[in-house]
Image: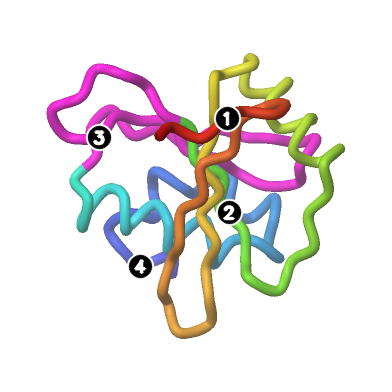
Amino acid sequence: MDTHPSYPALSEVLPKYPKVAGALFQTYNDLKLAQQWTDLEVLDLPSCSRGALRGKRPQMDTTLYVIPCSLSESLSTSWLQDAFKELGEPPHIYLAINAEDSSIVYYKISPGIVKPPV
């Protein structure tokens, strides 16, 4: 992993959280290389014991937040509340659920109860 071209951008956060390093590495590369997000930054979320990502989708001005995790992890509502607080209370965040086969599913999470669009 440390010889990959994307490692320098992740090098400060990956060693801090080895249990979730794979999910962060995989999600960063998916957003940067496959989805071509711009202004992609790696954030440290100590309260959630992991790194997160902030950036913009192509041709969009809205800043989005992504928190990588693995399919085998158990997450709680208090964990999500801590993530929202530490990220500055954005209107929503995306959980990037990484599976062992390298697939990633993104879930949009909003605080509170939000009526789905019709």
Task: Tell me which residue sits at (32%, 65%) in the image.
Answer: 4
Q: Residues within 10 Å of mark 2 (few under 14, many from 20)?
A: many
Which image quarter: residue 39?
top left
Q: Can you identify the residue that label 3 sits on?
A: 57
Residue hosting label 2? 14
In this rendering, the label closer to the viewer, 4 or 2 = 2
Seen as rendered, the residue at the extreme front is 118
Query: In this image, 83 relative to 79: left or right?
Result: left
What secondary structure is found at the residue carrying circle 1?
A: loop
Q: Which quadrant: the C terminus?
A: top left
Q: Earlier in the sequence, mark 4 or mark 2?
A: 4
Where, by quadrant of the figure, is residue 71 drawn?
bottom right
Query: Gap in Å between the C-alphas at discs 4 and 2?
Result: 13 Å
What is the spatial separation of the Cα atoms under label 3 and label 2, in whole angstroms?
23 Å
Is 84 in the magenta? Answer: no
Give yes or no for contact between labels 4 and 2 (Cβ–Cβ under 8 Å).
no
At a point 62% along the width and 58% down the height, the residue shown is: 69
**Counting other residues with Cα less than 10 Å from the Cα at mark 1, is it few (<14), some (14-19), or many (20 or more)?**
few
* Residue of label 1: 115
| Above or below: residue 75 compared with residue 51 | below
- Number of callouts in the render? 4
- Circle 1: residue type: Lys
Which span of residues is magenta-colored?
37-64
The amino acid type of the residue labelled 3 equals Arg
Q: Which mark is residue 97?
A: none
Precedes in sequence: disc 3 or disc 2? 2
